[in-house]
Image: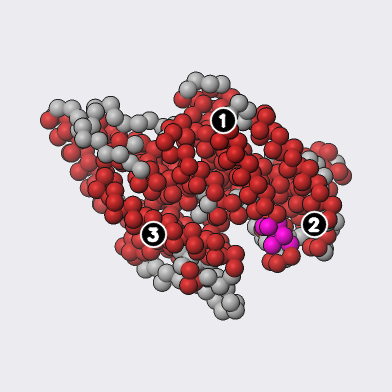
Amino acid sequence: MDDLNDLISDTDFFLFFIYALIGYFLIRYVIFKNRDKRFYLMVKIFFGLKLISAIVMSLLTVYYWKIGDAISYFNESQNLIQLFKKDISNIKYLFIPVEYYSSQLSLDNDLIRTVNGAGQESSFLISKLCAIFYPFALGKYLLVNFLFCFMSIVGQLKFYTVLVKRYPHLKKVIAISILFMPTLLLYSSTIYKETLCYSCIGFIFYNFHQIMHKRNAVWNTFFLILNAFLILTVKFYVIVAFLISIFLLLFFQFVGIMFRHSLITKSFVIILLMCLSTLFIYNIDFFNPYVLSFVDTSNNFQQYYNNDFGETSSFEIGEIELSAVGLLKKMPIGFYSTYFRPHIWEVKKPIVLFSALESFFILAFTLWTLTKKGIYLFQLIKKDLFARLSLYYVIILGIIIGLNTFNFGTLIRYKVPVVPFAWLFVFILYYYTPTIKIEKKSDRGFP
C-alpha cells in the first residue's frame, strides 16, 4: 500500500458498523445464547468498548504512527492474495514455512516489500490469518481489524464463562480482570500477535474445561492442541511459561500428597529433594550457555532501545552481569517493570497514560491486598490450584518480559497474555475467605 491514507475510507466505517451488527447477533443468539440479562448487558458494554478500541488503534496506526506491525501484516496478506490469484496452488503458502514465501518474494517484483518481522514465522502466521480473513473482510484493512477484534471478543468471553463457573461470587472482578482492563481493550483488538495469543489462551481454558466435563472430548482436544500450536508459533515463551508453571504445580502437588503419608514416605521425599538439589547445584554449569545467551540478548536489546533516537518511551534496568547470579539480581526489577511500570511520571506519549494509570492501580491494590490478606497467601496457594498456577505463570512470564523489553509501548503489548492472570490472582486473594479447618480433599481442581 503506497499511500497509507488509502487503507481506510469513509465507506469502511459504514461497513464496519454493518459487520458489528452481524457480529453482535452471532454472539447474542448463536455463540452465547440462553444467558441471563446481566451477562448480555456486560456483553453489550464489552462489545462496544472493543469495537471502539479497534477503531482507535486502527486510526492511530494509519494516521498517527503511519507505520507498524499491523500494516506490515496486512501488506503481507495482500502479497499472499496476489499469489493465490496468480495460481490457486499457491495456497500452499498457508501451510509451509516462511522461508519458501521469502524466496518467492525475492523473485516477484509485483509483491510488496515489508521490513517489520520479515522472515519470521511468528509474523508470517499473523499475515496468513489476515489472508484468510481478507475475502471475508472484502479486502478492507479496517474490516480485517474487526475480524481480529471479534475473534478476541469470543476468546475472552469463553475464558470469562469458564472462570465464573469456578468463582461465581467474583463475576464483577473477573470481568474487570480479563475483559475491561485498558491494556487488554487497546492491545488485543487489532492485528497484533497479542490479539491472537490472548484469544487462544481463552479458547484453551474453555477447551480444557469442556474436556474435563466430558463434552465433545475429541473435538475440544483437537482445538486445544491447535490453539497451543498457534501460541507456540507467535509467542513461544508464553507456552514455555505455562509448561514450567504446570510442572511446578504438579511437582509441588506430588510433594504435598507424599508428605501426608507415613514418616518413611516423608523421609523419602526429603532425601529425594536433597538429591535433586545437589544434582542441580553440581550441574549448574550446564545452564551457563543458555544464561549467557539470554543475558547477552537482554543487554543488546537494552542498548538498542536506549540509543539516542530523540523522545522515546524507552527505559533501562541497568546492564546485567554475564552470570547466573547477575541474572538473578535483575529478576525482581524485571518482574516489577512488567506489572508496575510505566510510572505516571515516565509517560511521554498520551497512549501510554492508560497503561501508566493501570500499573499504578495494580501496584496500589496489590500492596493493599497484601496488607489485608497477606497472612492467608500460603493458605490460598495450598488450597486453590488455579490461583497457584496463575502465580507461577505471572512470576515466570513477568520476569521473561521484564528482562527483554525496554520500551514501554512494546512492554504494554507483550504483557497482554499475562496481565489478566496477575489481576485475577490479586482479586482472588483479596476476596479469599480463610478457613479454620482444612479438609484433606480441599484442593480445588482446574476449571
CA–CA distance in space, label 1 to label 2: 37 Å
Query: Does label 1 or label 3 sit earlier along the sequence?
Result: 1
Q: Secondary structure at mark 3?
A: helix
Q: Secondary structure at mark 2?
A: loop
Query: In the image, which is nearer the foreground, mark 2 or mark 3?
Result: 3
To which residue does mark 1 refer? Answer: 36
To which residue does mark 3 refer? Answer: 364
**Range shown magenta:** 56-62
Q: In front here: 175 or 82? A: 175
Q: Position of residue 263 (x, y in %)?
A: 12, 30
To which residue does mark 2 refer? Answer: 8
Q: Residue at x 67, y 57 (%)?
A: 57
Circle 3 Cα neighbour tier, 10 Å, few/some/many (<14 / 14–19 / ≥20): few
Q: Position of residue 412 (x, y in %)?
A: 53, 59
Circle 2 Cα neighbour tier, 10 Å, few/some/many (<14 / 14–19 / ≥20): some
Q: Position of residue 3 (x, y in %)?
A: 82, 64
Quadrant, the C terminus: top left
Query: In the image, which is nearer the foreground, mark 1 or mark 3?
Result: 1
Q: In front here: 323 or 400? A: 400
- The answer to whether residue 56 shows anywhere in this view is yes
